[in-house]
Image: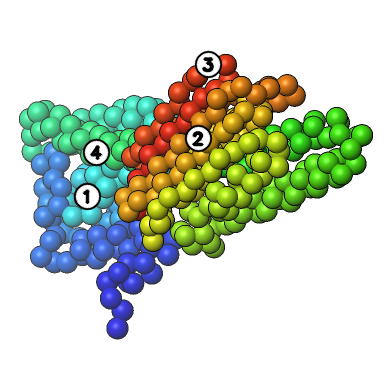
């Protein structure tokens, strides 16, 4: 047995013309019910007339064009208006006259071009109809024709309101989609910045040092090996980043860090940066994005240390608790900045935003020379 949701889904698969034709056929069938004869719209007071062969054609002309009320609303209104005019002049007064209000609402909601011209032409066509009905009818006061015209305007206005509401909703969805794409691009850019900048900076510093080691082959070989290892780690981290962009990966795969803090520290030491590393506590079972953000904080801070305070004593302290991860990276700035590439400041700004999203705190303290201290408190358990 098909439930109502399945039936509704199947119904929506039909072309819009087929669905609108069903409305026209329903109104057509109702118009021929004997109990509803002469119980439709009555304008001008024309004497009622029983249905004849012409009535069948007139009712069909009013109802069947509703099939194209959304595809060709202007054509629908034209045909329905002609049928309505004959209906009133002949005195059939069928319930098919309701189709005129439906056609007007459809024009207001779905007509895209020449809306003003269509409104003017329809209003101009209504005037001679009202004059003829006033002369041939039982003498209804002109106020009745004005009232009926205002009712038709109301139907058009309702359709126009529906159209503007639909357009506003489409614009809202477009903006949401654009904002979502922009946020995704920003997130990808941050990840690329964190991965590429850190490894490339280490490789640049190591390669710069190798220039001065030509007289000591052993140390030169160690430095070039470190450059090679850094390049391999860069490729590994980039593959991890591609995994983050893969929708088939689960939440845990997308929020876990690409490597441990020890790996970052060891790589920075190989680039010639003396680093003291302390990690306390046991990581929580579920940290959400906190683990990855903490990893990026240490990565960016060590990258800045290589850039701006190469050779300075650097300290990395990571503390895990049940509710948060605290990170502090500091350097005394006594080293050299020679050969280090400049920075754009995007890394720290991006980290501040990412920590703030998780409800944490991020502080950068500038010290004398090139020294600095980066402190971050990152709540765990968030799936942001």
Q: Which residue is mark 1?
A: 97
- Counting from the top left corner in percent of width and height, residue 189 is at 58, 38
- Counting from the top left corner in percent of width and height, residue 344 is at 60, 24
82 left or right of 269?
left
Q: Which residue is mark 3?
A: 368
**What residue is drawn where x is 57% and y is 16%?**
369
Q: How much space separates mark 1 and mark 3, taking CA atoms?
A: 86 Å
Q: How much space separates mark 2 and mark 1, taking CA atoms?
A: 79 Å
204 left or right of 126?
right
Q: Which one is in front in this view, the residue at disc 3 or the one at disc 4? A: 3
- Mark linked to residue 11: none
Pick the residue in front: 239 or 59. Answer: 239
Q: Which residue is mark 4?
A: 158
Q: Which is more N-terminal, label 1 or label 4?
A: 1
- Regarding mark 4 in the picture, which secondary structure is present there? helix
> Do the residues under discs 3 and 2 have CB atoms within 8 angstroms?
no
163 left or right of 333?
left
Q: Is residue 134 above or below residue 19?
A: above
Count neighbours of disc 2 (C-alpha within 10 A) and say few if under 14, some if 14 to 19, many if 20 or more: many
Q: Residue furthest bottom?
A: 1
**What residue is drawn where x is 38% and y is 69%?**
10
> Do the residues under discs 1 and 3 have CB atoms within 8 angstroms?
no
């Amino acid at each position: 047995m098909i439930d109502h949701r399945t039936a509704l889904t199947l119904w929506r698969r039909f072309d819009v013309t087929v669905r609108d034709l069903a409305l026209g056929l329903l109104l057509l069938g109702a118009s021929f019910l004997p109990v509803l004869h002469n119980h439709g719209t009555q304008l001008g007071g024309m004497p009622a007339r029983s249905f004849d062969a012409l009535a069948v054609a007139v009712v069909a002309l009013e109802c069947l064009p509703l099939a194209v009320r959304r595809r060709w609303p202007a054509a629908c209104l034209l045909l329905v208006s002609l049928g309505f005019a004959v209906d009133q002049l002949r005195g059939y007064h069928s319930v098919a006259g309701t189709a005129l209000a439906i056609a007007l609402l459809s024009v207001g909601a779905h007509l895209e071009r020449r809306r003003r011209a269509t409104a003017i032409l329809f209003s101009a066509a209504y005037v001679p109809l009202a004059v003829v009905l006033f002369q041939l009818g039982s003498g209804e006061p002109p106020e009745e024709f004005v009232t009926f015209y205002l009712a038709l305007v109301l139907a058009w206005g309702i359709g126009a309101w529906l159209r503007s509401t639909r357009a506003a909703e489409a614009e809202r969805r477009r903006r949401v989609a654009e904002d979502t794409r922009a946020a995704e691009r920003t997130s990808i850019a941050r990840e690329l910045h964190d991965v590429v900048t850190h490894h490339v900076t280490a490789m640049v510093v190591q390669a710069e040092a190798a220039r001065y080691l030509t007289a000591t082959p052993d140390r030169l070989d160690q430095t070039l090996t470190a450059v090679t290892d850094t390049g391999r780690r860069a490729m590994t981290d980039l593959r991890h980043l591609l995994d983050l962009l893969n929708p088939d990966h689960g939440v845990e795969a997308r929020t876990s860090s690409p490597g441990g803090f020890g790996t970052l520290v060891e790589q920075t030491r190989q680039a010639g940066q003396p680093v003291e590393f302390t990690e306390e506590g046991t990581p929580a079972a579920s940290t959400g994005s906190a683990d990855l953000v903490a990893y990026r904080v240490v990565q960016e801070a060590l990258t800045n240390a290589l850039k701006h305070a190469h050779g300075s004593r650097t300290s990395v302290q990571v503390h895990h608790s049940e509710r948060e991860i605290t990170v502090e990276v500091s350097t005394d700035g006594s080293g050299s900045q020679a050969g280090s590439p400049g920075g754009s400041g995007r890394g720290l700004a991006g980290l501040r935003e990412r920590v703030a999203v998780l409800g944490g705190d991020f502080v950068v303290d500038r010290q004398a020379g090139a020294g600095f201290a980066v402190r971050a408190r990152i709540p765990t358990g968030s799936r942001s």
